[in-house]
Every structure is written in C-alpha cells, then in structure tokens.
Image (cartoon, rainbow, N blue to C red):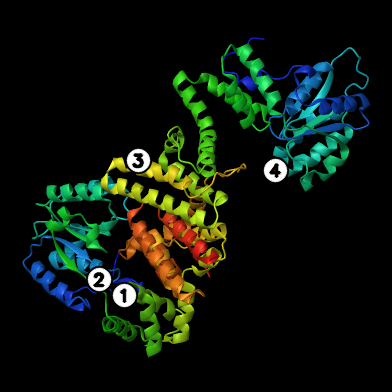
Amino acid sequence: MDFKGSDVWTEKYRPKKFSELVGQEEVVKRVSSLVGSMNIPHLLFAGPAGTGKSTLALIIVRELFGESWRDNHLELNASDERGIDVVRQKVKDFARTKAIGDVPFKVIFLDEADALTREAQQALRRTMENFTSTCRFILSCNYSSKIIDPIQSRCVVFRFKLLEKKDIRKVIDKIIQNEGLTITQDAFDVLYEFSEGDCRRVINLMQATASISPNISIDLVNTIISQAKPSDIKIVLDYALAGDFQNSRQKLLDIMLKESVSGQDVIKSIQKEIWNLPIDNDLKVRLTEKTGEAEFRLVEGSDEFIQLEALIASFVLAGGK
Amino acid sequence: MNFPDNIPWCEKHRALCFADIKGQDLAVDKINIFLKSFPRKRAAILHGPPGVGKTSLAYVIAAEIDAEILELNASDLRNKEKILQIIKPASEQRSLFKRSKIILVDEVDGISVKDRGGLSELLGIVEKTSFPVIITANDIWKPSFNLLRQRCELIQLKDVDYKVILDILKIICTKENCVVSNDVLTSISIKSRGDIRAAINDLQALSKLDEHSFVKEIGERNKEESIFNSLQYVFKNASLDTKMLGIFDNVDMNIDEIFLWVEENIPLEYRKEELAKAFDALSRADMFRGRIYTHQHWRFMVYEYFLLGPGIAASKKFNRAGWTSYKKPSRILKIWLNNQRVAKKKTICQKYAKHVHISTKRAMKDFLVLRIILKNNIIRKELKLNEEEIEYLDKQI
C-alpha cells in the first residue's frame, strides 16, 4: 500500500499533514496539540462519512512515528471483521510487541466502531483497558450515540462537521490544477449536491467524470451520476400504490441485493421520493410520518427487510384509498 | 445369498422376478413383447426418472429367460473385441439349451455426455447385434438420441406411487428385522417422489441412527408439517384462544425461521388493511427481537411470540375458510444466490477497500461509481486485480 504512487484520487489527494485537512479547523487544532506532546489519549472521532476521520487518524500516526508509521499502526474496520473475537485477537497479536522508536505506544485505528454490537463494545472496552500501557485506540463512528458510554468516557471525543461547499471547492481546485482539468460552476454545483458533503464521493465522481473528458461540464457530470445512481426506488412505490404488494417487495429485494444498498439508504430514497408522487398532500404527510416511523424501527429492530415490507404495506393501504 | 452388512440395501433387495417389479406392469408387458418379437427390433430403451427400477427390470428379464447379462459401459463401446463378440453371430446357431445373452447398456445419457463417439458405436451395435440390447436412460428426448430412438423400442417406466414404495419398504423392514413406525415409512415414501432407490437409501440411513438422532430425524420431517398447521391457525382464525397464545410453541424451529415463514406468507392471506396490520405486527415483533439482541433482555421474547402469533391473527376481524398452500421462505435463498452472483464484485471491493482505508461494505455501496474509475488499467494494476475480476469489470456498463 504505497500512497505516493496511487492513481486512485481519493488516495492520491488524501491530506498528509494537519494543515492540509479542510473544514475541521477546531478538531485539527486540538488534535495537533495533543500529538505535539508525543502522548495521546484514546480518541473517538464521530461524524458523517467523507469528512476526514480516517485521514486525520492516518496523519496522527505519521506525525507520531514518522517513517516507521506502518510498523506501529494497525488499521481495522469493525464492519469487515467477523466478530469481536477476531478484533480482539488481532489487537492482542499487534500489541504483544513493543513499539519501534521513541514513542512508547502503538496506535490502533478501529474504523466504523459503531458497527459493533453493544456486547462487542463491552468486550472492546476490556481490551482497551488491558492494553492501555502499550496501545492507544482511535475509534471512528458516524454517530457517537451508538458507542456505549464506558468507551466514550475513556476517549476524548471529537466531532467532525459536514464539509461546507467552500471546503469541497478547495479540494476540487487542487485536483483540477494538478490534473489539468476544467470544471464549470454548474457542474460543480451538481457534483456537490449529489455527494451531500461527502468528500470521498466528490473525488470519486470527479475521477469517474475526468476519465471521459478533462473538461468537466454539467452534461458530463449528469451522465456519470445517472450511471452511478442506484436504481429508482420509485418503481417499488409505484407497485405498492397500485396495490401489488408481491411485486413491490420482489423489486425492493432485487434492488437491495443487486446494488448492495442498505435499508437506511432505501428509507432515505423513499422519504425523498414521496414528494414527487402523484398523491394528495395530506397523504404525503402521513406517508412521510410512516417512513420516519419505519426508520426508527429499522434502527431498533433486527431485520431491515421486514421493516421495509411493513412500510410498503402501508403504501399499499394508502394507495387503495 | 449371504450379504455382508455393508452392501447397500437397494442392491441387496433388488427385484429378482417379475413379481418383485412393482408398479410397472405396462413396461413389463412391453419388454416381454419386445423379447418375443426379437429381432424385429434389436434394442429397447427403458427410460424414466431415477430409481424407478430400469436396471432392476433388465436384470429380472434376464433371470426370467435364463439369459446372461453382458453389461457395457462407455469404454467398452470403444473396445473392438468386445463389440465383435456381440455383433459376431455368436456361433450362430447356439443350442437352445445354452444360456442366451442380453446386452445391457446402462445409463446411456451418461455416456453421450462424456463420449460422443460412443453413441455411434452404440448405434452400430444396435444395427447388427445378435442378442437383444437393453438400454437404460433417464432422458431420451435429447436431440443427440434421435437416431437411437428410431431404431429402438421405447419402453417408459413411470414414477412409482408412494403406496407401492411404502409396501417395498415394509417388506425390507421385515427382512432386515428393523422396526420403523408406519408414519416414518410413509413420510419416507412420499419424500422420495417416486424414487425407490432413494427411499431405500433413506430407510437404511435411518436404521443406522441411534434412538436419539432417529427421533430428531423424524422431527425434521415433521417440522414443515407443524409450521404449516401453525400458519394455517394464525391466518385463518380471528379469535384469540389459548391455542393461539402458544401457537408456535410446538414448532420445532428457531424463532428467526418462523419470522421468515410468516413474512413470506402474509401476502398470500391478507390484503390491504389486513396486510398493513399484519406487517405492522411483524415489524413490532422484529423490534422486540432487536431489543433482545441489544439489551439481552430475554423476557421480550414473550412479546415477540405474542405479536408473531396472536398479533398477526388479530389483523383480521373474521375467521376465514379455505385452504392456502403456504410457501417456503425464499428470501434467504435469494440472498445466497445473489452472493454467488456478485462474488467477483466482492473480491474487487475487498481489494479496493483495503487500499483506500474504507470498509468493503462501503466500497460495495459505491461500486456504481467505482466501476467507472476501475476501467483505468493503471489502477487495475495498482489494486492487483486478477483476470476474472477484470473480466467482471469489463462486463459493467
């Protein structure tokens, strides 16, 4: 994994110094002063996707360990590791040996820590305690509320903001300069709208677009976006409103499987789509409320698909009236 | 004959005479006519599903006319000497007292797949043979069998009725001295779908189980029946009696499986308002399931089961009549099939994810954009994608 040579732009343009990270000035200020003392506590980074959590973690280990950062750093992704036992074993193996260099500890970056269940987090907390003398943990998550209190209280919590348009513009300008591209203002606006402040998404879309032409126009961006958009959830709703539950759920499962979209994503698209449906306003309001309820249940429940089916069933009912 | 223990029962109890061939009277008649009129047609094809007794019938015929069976397989068909032996008017006028021969070419559909040439050799034999040829096949309607079909007498063996299989199993049980309840024998017979061999194999496997697993095995077989009954009760009855309260108590499935069965079948019974209500109950049941996982509060199971049974039953106001054929849950299978289909996508995403510090899940989600970026050969090399993965990517858009 050599960053220098990477042609994947999200890697190529990943900030390597504190000063290069955009949009998180407060966080960066405090973190860099912690790192300056060559001793950090456990850290918890909370914030939306594509706002710089992993990047900041990588910068920290580079600052701490310099050239030998790779040997002193373990990166794990909670949503990819099968169970807490695997995490624990990897942490154990990694923490067994002493850190190389001046810094007396190693750093473990556990990404998407909110993917761990509560029990797994309890186990993680024990692991963090056991290895505190040799290891520091940096955890990242989307919502800190999904991290159990005992872990939060052991960490210094940093909240990452959604990147503003001007921050994203900075990132894009750098790429444009470096790659010799042009981009029109309206093309940038569409890019930004579609990515919802997720910097990784913006860069990926840029690279996909630039692979067709270095002059990025709004038409080009729209073409790419239409290829990158998951299938329309609208057809699911159309079937439901027409009273055809079986086809509706069939279609929904197909879309979810083929495009690896999560239940949360589906709910989000449904919620947006409701306003475009040819139905009465009071029905729109009621269905939106139903959708909100479904989203709540989805978080609370254990089988996303059942919750979505229940939502579709209420669309069937609404359509019949 | 003394058989050692390890002989499969389906071999050990093969039919020995016409009387042993059960449920194939028409086929038996036809093959007798074929033999009497030989050499009007020189070969007969016994065709039918597996395990209905094609090979057995051939052996029985041989025994009845006191002929010796000469079995041919794919490699024999290329063996000149063996073929000559068959075709050569084998010392033409053999004494009537000497044993005759029947050539058996077993499972010819197996031959044609592996060895296309074998088929033409077989045709040669069928034209010139001086002994009756009996060919067995599962499916003779493949185009490659056109010529063969024209030259042979076609004799179809039918699926065997489960009652016939039941009788066969009972006879075997008596011979083997093994006691199996009638219910179990019946369920084996039905499950075999006309395949005698499968039924006998099942019976033998069952007889080897110790008592505990024997009971469990029977339990497996009863499982579906009891979920059907429970679903029927929930979906058809509107009144909440004590039976409804414990409706899933005796279903030998874990609750996650029951969820899937209920979920699959709600739309078969309920429409509109009832449908919405039923799914609402199911969704609430699922919330309690989620809470059990996160809080380890097992008492919530009470509500989980309540919503799943009475909760769903109460979605309707009145009892309903009629019989519904409930379906097996299909979602898990679909997920599995899809995983097979997108296996390449997954390995690509794993490589990419590791490279750019994100989770595989996230990469899968972003795949629609990534596939465009991954058209770049330098990046493909950078990620060390293999040929299959590249092929998969090239098929995109």
**Mark nearer the N terminus (2 vs 1):** 2
Q: Which residue is mark 2?
A: A52
Name of the residue lying farthest toward the left: A37
How far apart are the two marked residues, 4 and 2, measured between alpha carbons?
Answer: 59 Å
Of badges 1 and 3, nearer the viewer stands: 3
Q: Residue B370: x and y, percent?
A: 42, 69
Task: Please tell me if label 4 and label 3 are on a single chain.
Answer: yes
Give the quarter of the image for residue A246: bottom right
Q: Which residue is mark 4?
A: B113
Camera sees residue A22:
yes
Instruction: Return the chain for callout 4.
Output: B
Q: Which residue is mark 1?
A: A199
Query: In the rendered structure, which amino acid carries the disc numbered 4?
Result: Val
Which residue is nearer to you in this view: A213 or B297?
Answer: B297
Instruction: Return the chain for callout 3.
Output: B
Query: In the rendered structure, which amino acid carries the disc numbered 2?
Result: Gly
Task: Please tell me if label 3 and label 2 are on a single chain.
Answer: no
**Local SS, label 1:** helix
Answer whether labels 2 and 1 touch (C-beta < 8 Å): yes
